[in-house]
Amino acid sequence: MYCNYCGKVIQDDALVCAYCGIRVGASLARVKLVRPRLGRKVAGVCLGFSEYFDIDVTLVRVVWLIVAFMTGVGFLSYLIAWIIMPEEPLLLPAPTGVQPMTDTRY
């Protein structure tokens, strides 16, 4: 398999190129910008942005706090994102122990 960015040969099962560090395997990134239900600290805004852009959540939180305390824009943008960003849909577990329907006519 070849890296799409640097063109070097990499392992077939590699998720990250060993030469340029770009993710080349199947990405688990979200398609939509949502606030996840698990792992959030306040409202999940920073976690949602970090998963959407595939960067570390700690970096997003630190940058957001710096912007918030330096300019005040961070507080307002966090509130707006909290209102606008949809929450991640509930994933209901598959039913267990359900008996298959049988035909009792015979």
Image (cartoon, rainbow, N blue to C red):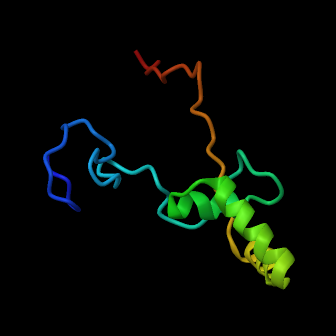
How many numbered circles does the render carry? 0
Which x, y percent locates residue 32? 53, 66
Q: Check the picture and name the quadrant holding the C terminus.
A: top left
Left or right relative to 38: residue 33: left
Which of the 4 image quarters holds residue 7? bottom left
Which x, y percent locates residue 62? 73, 62
* Residue 70 in view of the camera: yes
Q: Is residue 89 above or below residue 85?
A: above
Left or right relative to 76: residue 5: left
* Residue 35 in view of the camera: no
Which of the 4 image quarters holds residue 85? bottom right
Q: Residue at x 26, y 49 (%)?
A: 19
Which x, y percent locates residue 84? 72, 77
Q: Nearer the viewer, residue 88 or 11?
A: 11
Left or right relative to 91: residue 15: left
Q: Residue at x 64, y 61 (%)?
A: 48
Q: Check the picture and name the quadrant holding the N terminus.
A: top left
Q: Nearer the viewer, residue 38 or 25?
A: 25
Q: Nearer the viewer, residue 2 or 6?
A: 6
Q: Nearer the viewer, residue 32 or 11?
A: 11
Which x, y percent locates residue 26? 33, 48
